[in-house]
Image (tube, rainbow, N blue to C red):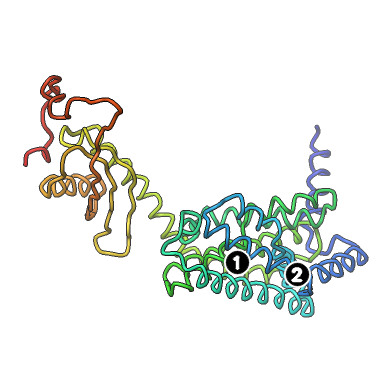
Amino acid sequence: MNRSAIIEQLQRFRHKYLSTGRRVSLQQLKYMTDSLSDESQAGNSFLVLTLGSCIIATFGLLSNSSAVIIGAMLIAPLMLPIRSLSFGILEADKPLIRTSAKAVFIGTGAAIAVSMLLGMGVNLSGYGSEVWSRTQPNLLDLGIAMTAGALAGFAKIEAKISSSLAGTAIAVALMPPLCVVGLWLAKFELRWAWGALVLYLTNLLGITLACMLVFLWAGYSPVIKARRPLVWTTALTSLLMLPLGVTSYRLLVQDRLESNLEEALLDRTLTFQRLELVSLETDWFPNPPEVRLLVYANEPVTPVQVNLLEEFVAGEMGRPFTLVFQVAQLEKVTSEPTRSMDDADSLTPMPSPAPAPWQQN
């Protein structure tokens, strides 16, 4: 390809995607505005689908069933008014902003209220992993929200792929975080309710910003006109970077901490070689953070061993951690009489490699 052809291609690309003017006809613009306005109405259908998806999602969270929660995501209509809101902000279309914002507000409030009432009615003593996983959002969730929002905007522009909107709704999961907020409010646990609310706000702002960028890219709004709303939406989204960044950092530290503890417990020591690590959970609010380890063991774990292991972890991680062992006795039971564990140990001596520092108790 010669130089003139390359220049011509670049000019076409600039005119199509980087032009400062509007690149769609007035008919296309009116059709898009009217279509989004119809989608953002908080009518009876919207309310029925919102309440139905909320009830299904809440029961799915209470029963810790991911399949039920996915079904609720398919029904939830919240993606539609959020997409309309992004177009209204981009075009400074006040009627569209009012209509879509009203639908988002009604859907959000209704979902939190219904899930809170259901949580109070069922009154479980504790929640499962599906609830807990939505209380600590991180930067990965923002990336998912923006990708899903971009696909939702593209699905509106390209009618041929509009069927993919259901899959996009599953990916971004708007309804479950709202239900988690209500469930934690039912227990008056504001800390965890706030975490789930941050996840919902991350999804809301991520979808809005990504849809605005897609509509701008498609030529529905001039760059000059869209600059200010884009700056404000980006600024609001950036405010979430601090809590999301903190959670992401803790996620990385948690992974490294688990690796070091597993290596120390299972590979480096004779003291813990007959110990089975079942689960590990870190509470970051105390200072230093508290790590609870559920283990199966044949022998008791002594305070001296825990102290030496804390020193090892502090050296590896560069900061102190408080280790709390929850030890469950491991006992082998069969249908036939067997020798006791002590007799078996006396018949089969263990190898004697050099002991680790925390062995000496």
Distance in Å between CA atoms under marks 2 and 1: 28 Å
Q: Mark number for residue 234?
A: 1
Q: Position of residue 182 (x, y in %)?
A: 53, 71
Which of disc 1 and disc 2 is earlier in sequence? 2
Residue 97 horizontal side relative to residue 331, left or right: right
Question: What is the three-letter code of the residue carrying label 1?
Answer: Thr
Q: Please tell me whether mark 2 sits on a helix, a strand or a loop.
A: helix
Q: Position of residue 190 (x, y in %)?
A: 43, 73
| Residue denoted by label 2 | 46
Q: Mark number for residue 84?
A: none
Q: How many marks?
A: 2
> In the rendered image of this protein, does residue 98 appear above or below residue 295?
below
Residue furthest to the right: 27
Question: What is the three-letter code of the residue carrying label 2?
Answer: Phe
Residue 126 horizontal side relative to residue 229, left or right: left
> In the rendered image of this protein, does residue 28 appear above or below residue 346?
below
Q: Quadrant of residue 300?
A: top left
Q: Quadrant of the N terminus?
A: top right
- Circle 2: is it few (<14), some (14-19), or many (20+) Cα within 10 Å? many
Q: Residue at x 12, y 46 (%)?
A: 302
Q: Residue at x 25, y 50 (%)?
A: 326
Q: Position of residue 332 (x, y in %)?
A: 26, 32
Q: Quadrant of the C terminus?
A: top left
Assess whether mark 1 and mark 2 are in contact (beta carbons under 8 angstroms): no
Which residue is more in the foreground, 32 or 232? 32
Q: Please tell me whether mark 1 sits on a helix, a strand or a loop.
A: helix
> In the rendered image of this protein, does residue 304 appear above or below residue 339?
below
Residue furthest to the top: 347
Residue 178 horizontal side relative to residue 35, left or right: left
Q: Residue at x 11, y 38 (%)?
A: 359
- Circle 1: is it few (<14), some (14-19), or many (20+) Cα within 10 Å? some
Residue furthest to the front: 336
